[in-house]
Amino acid sequence: MTYTPPTDPLVFLHDDHQVVLVDKPSGLLSVPGKGPDLADCLLMRVQAVFPTALLVHRLDRDTSGVMVFALTPHAQRHLGLQFEKRQTRKTYVARVWGDMVAKTGTVDLPLIVDWPNRPRQMVDHENGRQAVTDWRVMRRGGGETRVRLMPKTGRSHQLRVHMLALGHPILGDPFYAEGAARDYPRLMLHSETLQFRHPDGGQGMRISAKAPF
């Protein structure tokens, strides 16, 4: 599949002397892939505006929404520890296939990379790493459900595999949705809110970006 990232100008949500937050578009890699054809990425585009920007975390190429970058090595360490110790809080919005019957729930299913089919991940109760997602239905209708997802861990493809495990794959997912559920212009998953402590003084920050779907 040819990599054709979007060319719209970046939307900056907040910046100061330590951090910059961006609304990442769907279809753009967070970091460079392997090879010159995969060099264009959010990190590179942010560095064109903020040359000292450093990576803290990633979003999947197909996921949109709030991402934070550090502007100093101190901020990178500070934020990195918050992610590592699960002190950040993230909420996502997704549109999923089918009507979810319950209003809220938690998925607690360990995940591991599906080696022959990577980057796909899969549930593995023997060798998988713990992965926990809380979810809450926002609305149902038209054969789909709009749901808010609150991951407690940060595994690769966690939200995508957990929704699939519930029988409600995220619409437009090129890896886990099939048939009509896949036939959407993009992955219907958006990082809506990120909460963290500011690296300079520890003040609580809450940055949001509205879902474009």
Image: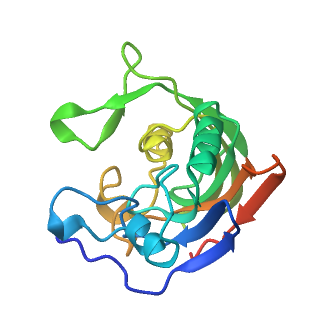
| Front in this rendered view, residue 29 or 121 | 29
In the rendered image, the quadrant that contains the C terminus is bottom right
Q: Is residue 26 left or right of residue 76?
A: left
Residue at position x 27%, y 44% from top?
119
* Horizontal arrangement in the rendering, residue 41 relative to residue 131 (left or right): left
Image coords of residue 92 (percent x, y)? 62, 56
- Say if residue 141 shows up in the picture: no
Compared to residue 195, the image places residue 95 above or below, namely below
Query: Among all residues in the image, which is located at the extreme bottom?
Result: 8
What is the basis of the colouring in this image? rainbow
Closest to the observer: 162 or 50? 50
Residue 27 as seen in the image, left or right of residue 118: right
Q: How many marks?
A: 0
The quadrant where residue 39 appears: bottom left
**Residue at figure coordinates x 45%, y 37% from the top left:** 165
Please tell me which residue is depicted at 52% across the width and 72% down the height of the picture. 50
Q: Quadrant of residue 182?
A: bottom left
Relative to 171, residue 129 above or below: above
Could you tell me residue 4's position as x and y percent? Answer: 26, 77
* 202 lies above or below 53: above
* Residue 154 shows up from this direction: yes
Side of 23 where 164 appears, left or right: left
* x then y, percent, for residue 12: 61, 76
Q: Nearer the viewer, residue 77 or 108?
A: 77
Q: Where does the N terminus fall, quadrant-wise?
A: bottom left
Residue occupying image coordinates x 37% and y 75%:
185
Q: Residue furthest top?
A: 126
**Which residue is at the front of the view, 62 or 33?**
33
Residue 67's x, y, as percent? Answer: 56, 60
